[in-house]
Image (cartoon, rainbow, N blue to C red):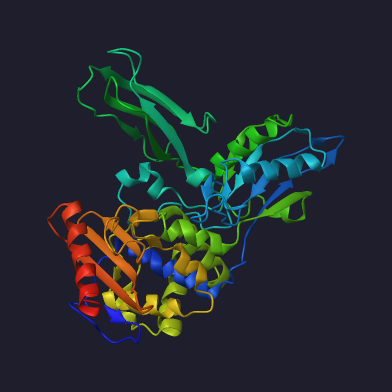
Amino acid sequence: IEDAQGATVFARNADRLFTPASTAKIIVSAAASALLPPSFSVATSVYGTGPLADGTLDGDLVVYGRGDPTFVGRCYGTDTLAVGACDSLWTRIDIIADTVVARGLRHVTGAIVGDGSWFEPQLIHPAWETYDLNWWYAAPVSALGFNDNSVNVIWGPGPAVDAPAAVRFEPALNAFLFENRTRTVQRGGARSFDYFREPGTLRMWAEGTVPLGMRERTDYFALPDPNLYFAQALRAALAARGVSVAGPSRSTVDPGQYQQCQSCPDFGSIRSRPVADWIYPILNASHNWVAEMLLKVLGAELGGEASWDAGLAVERAFLADSVGIDSTHATLSDGSGLAAHNLLTPRALVGVLRFMRDHPRGEAFYSGLAVGGVSGTLRTRYVSSDLNGRVIAKTGTISRVNTLAGYIELPDGDHLTFAIMLNHHGTSWGRAMRRIDAVVRAAVDQIDP
C-alpha cells in the first residue's frame, strides 16, 4: 500500500510472486491504454471469391476478422442511457449484413465462411482447466467472435414432475447438437442441472434435475469454433434480409486458404468500437475473453504476430521499459489471469497502477475499474460503509486465490494505491473477501483515523 507520493504505508511479502487471478487484467489493460491510441480499432471485412452479377455472387462469401470483441450485446460504461453506450446482440452483425445487401447481393452460390486466420490457429490456452472450456470465461480466442463466442442457455423446470427441464438458447442459430437428458422433480427437490460436451465437438447435452417452482436461470456456454459461429450468425442476418446462401456455413484458421481474397470483390468493412471501449468490460466486469482478444491484438499490432506469445512479449516490454518493473516481478501466461501459471508481485501491480494514474492515456483505464458499492465486480462490497464509491479497483478470483488491487480515494482528495493478494488459502470465498476488505479498512483508518 503506497500513498500518493509513492511512500510505503504498509508492506508484507511485497516482493514475493503470487498468482494474481483477474488482477492480471490490469497489465493487459494498462499496456493497451498506454501503447495504443484510445481511438484504435480493427476492421472486419467481407469478400466474395467470385464475380457478383445481377445480385448473385458466384463463389463463397468470406468474412475476415481481425480481433473485434464487440459483436455482442453489451454496455461500455456505467451510464447505460448515454447515446451509443450500449449495443444489442445483433447491432454490429446487422451493420455488416446491411452493407452487403447495399452492394446488391441477393444470392450466394457457394459457402459462407468465417475466416479467423488473422490470429494464430491455437484457440484454447494450454494452461486452462478442461472443465472451464465449457464456459464463457474460457471461450476460444480467434480473430472472429460473436456473442463472446458463447451461447446463452436459459433453463428452468419443465411443466410437470418427470418432464425434461425447459431449455432454450439465445441466439437460436442451431449451432450445435443438443440432447436434453434432464428431469423435473418435486418442488424443494435437489437441483443438479449441468452441461457437458464431447471435447472439441458441437455435441452437447444437459443432465441432472430441476425442481418445480425454481426461477429460470441463464448460463453462458462456450462454443468450440468461433469462426463457424460468426458465419452462422451472418447467414441468419442475411436470411432476414432476403439473401440466400446455397452452400454450407464453414470456418477456417488457415491463412493461405483465402489469401487471394485480398484482391477479391470487397463488400465492405466495419470498424470495431475503439479500444478504449474494450477496457471497460475487461476491468469492470472482469471479462476474460475480451482480455485475451486484446492481448492477441497487442501481439498483432506491436509484436509482429497475433498470438499469446507475441502479446505477452509486448506486456513484458511494457512492464520493463515503460513502467520500470523488475523483470523478476512478473511471469505472465495469459491476458485474463485464468491460468494459474501467472505470477506477479504486489509491488509490480502497485507500480503499474501508479504509472497509469498519471498517464495521459489513463482515463479509460481508471474509469473502467469497478467501484465499491456502485459498479462491476465491486458493486456489492463496501455498500453500507464510508468506503462506498471510494474503492476503485480490480478483483481477482480463481480456486484458492483472491486478490484486489486499485485505488482508495481519500476525503481530502488524496489517494492510496494498493495490491492485496491471497494465495493457497483454505478458507471460504466470503471469508477471504472479508479479510481483504479488513486490510482496505485498516489502511484508510491509518491514514485518516
Q: Quadrant of the N terminus?
A: bottom left
Q: Residue at x 46, y 83 (%)?
A: 322
Q: Quadrant of the C terminus?
A: bottom left
Q: Is residue 311 visible?
A: no
Q: Is residue 319 left or right of residue 431?
A: right
Q: Residue at x 16, y 61 (%)?
A: 424
Question: In this orientation, which residue lies closer to the viewer: 295 or 310?
Answer: 295
Question: In this orientation, which residue lies closer to the viewer: 369 or 113?
Answer: 369
Q: Is residue 114 visible?
A: yes
Give residue 178's quadrant in the image. top left
Q: Where is residue 399? Give x, y as percent.
A: 23, 54
Give residue 99's quadrant in the image. top right
Q: Where is residue 371? Give x, y as percent.
A: 38, 61
Q: How many marks?
A: 0
Q: Residue at x 33, y 86 (%)?
A: 6
Q: Is residue 110 left or right of residue 308?
A: right
Q: Residue at x 30, y 43 (%)?
A: 131
